[in-house]
Amino acid sequence: MTSVQAINIIVPFRNRSPEILEQLWLSLCEKTSVPFEFVVSDYGSHPEIAEKLNELASRRGFRIVRSETQGLPFSKAKAVNVAVKETKLPWILHVDADMVFFQTQLEALVGYLDESQVLLAESYWPQSSRQKPKNGKVFRSPGVFLLLHRNWFERLDGFCESFEFWGAEDSEWLDRLILAGCRPRWLTTQEITLYHSWHTRENSRIYRPYTAETRALEIQVENIWKGYRNNRWGTLVTSKDRPVLSRMGEAIEIDLFQKKETEWVGQLKSLLNQGRCVKLNLGPRKIKRIFSAFQRIAYAFDGLFNLFGLRLDYATNDNLEKFLSLRKMVGPELLDMYLEADYSSIFVVQRK
């Protein structure tokens, strides 16, 4: 165990209730003698939430690292990497915002520190009918709790920042750590008691585009095949990097649901080349159809459809998928975008 045991606790965050952060802080940091810094990596929360977050940080004495990424797809990978680059302590504990520690302080974690290991933790999801502590069922995911030495981030360039929206960035990071010789150790619920605060299941068909799922698989395969390097990992996004934020008021609108792809893509290219800001009206993300009443039944067949590489999708507007495919082809670094929270429209400008 290293003689230096100071820990940076890094919590990625966007548009959640600040109260859940306070629960996490109180459960882990209120009474401890271990030197630590609690850092919330705010990846572009709305102004009203950011204001509440700042008030809480002032009251509890923790730090906020703010990325001006509002309107961009959420990237947990970038949120964690930015906070790592903005901090200095030797140990990094990445934990999700909606976790609560029960009768566990930092002193307990220090006893497990080993520079050759990455520590992960099982957790309870007590309100879930699928995972009941009395039945011995627990939640095991590398994304909710991960503790390792800073050297691993610097050696491997941190989380892969190609992932957007959510999913797979944690498992890909763990895979690279293991391939590099970092030994994983899972702490059981007897060694550390960790609860996942309950929240309702979001409809991934609506809020996680199908394009993001296929892209995640592409990234994982590419990183295995070619390896992963990123010498700009952890770069903080500022307002100077977001030209779209100051130009949305002048946007020219295109209604995608009234045009063929060949029409709106050509019109978008022409306007962007002229230096204009464009608002793409996608239409409602969720489309009411006759099968919506059978949503739960339809979900049950997902596995069967996946076996044959088929997609069961009856309630999603594909215009967002089409734009994300276009953005990937053009290059995300060439387009700045602002995606409305309900996914009904996107503002786009071309970077100079």
Image: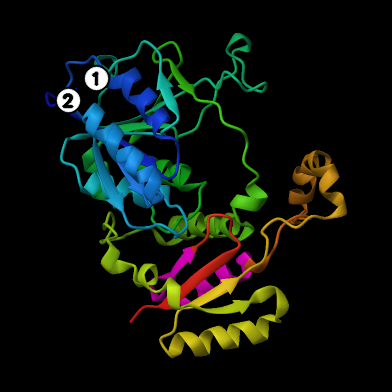
Q: Earlier in the sequence, mark 1 or mark 2?
A: 2
Q: Residue at x 44, y 10 (%)?
A: 190
The numbered dot on residue 81 is none
- Measuring from the top left, give residue 323's x and y in whole percent: 58, 71
Q: Nearer the viewer, residue 163 or 63?
A: 63
Which sits in the foreground, 180 or 18?
A: 18
**Secondary structure under badge 1?**
helix
- Examine the structure image and report whether residue 332 is included in the region drawn in magenta: yes
Q: How is the image coloured?
A: rainbow
Q: Main secondary structure of the magenta part?
A: helix
Q: Which residue is mark 2?
A: 5
| Mark 1 touches mark 2? (CB < 8 Å) | yes
Three-letter amino acid code of the residue under disc 1:
Val
Which residue is depicted at the point 61% across and 16% down?
Answer: 132
Q: Residue at x 12, y 23 (%)?
A: 3
Query: Which label is found at residue 110?
Result: 1
Residue 101 forms part of the magenta stretch: no
Q: Residues within 10 Å of mark 1 (few under 14, many from 20)?
A: some
Task: Label 2: state its secondary structure.
Answer: loop
Q: Residues within 10 Å of mark 2 (few under 14, many from 20)?
A: many
Which residue is painted at 26% across and 46% down in the image? 65
Residues under labels 1 and 2: Cα distance? Answer: 7 Å
* Relative height, residue 170 to residue 96 (above, below): below
Q: As drawn, is 18 to the left or to the right of 204?
A: left
Q: Which residues are magenta?
A: 320-338
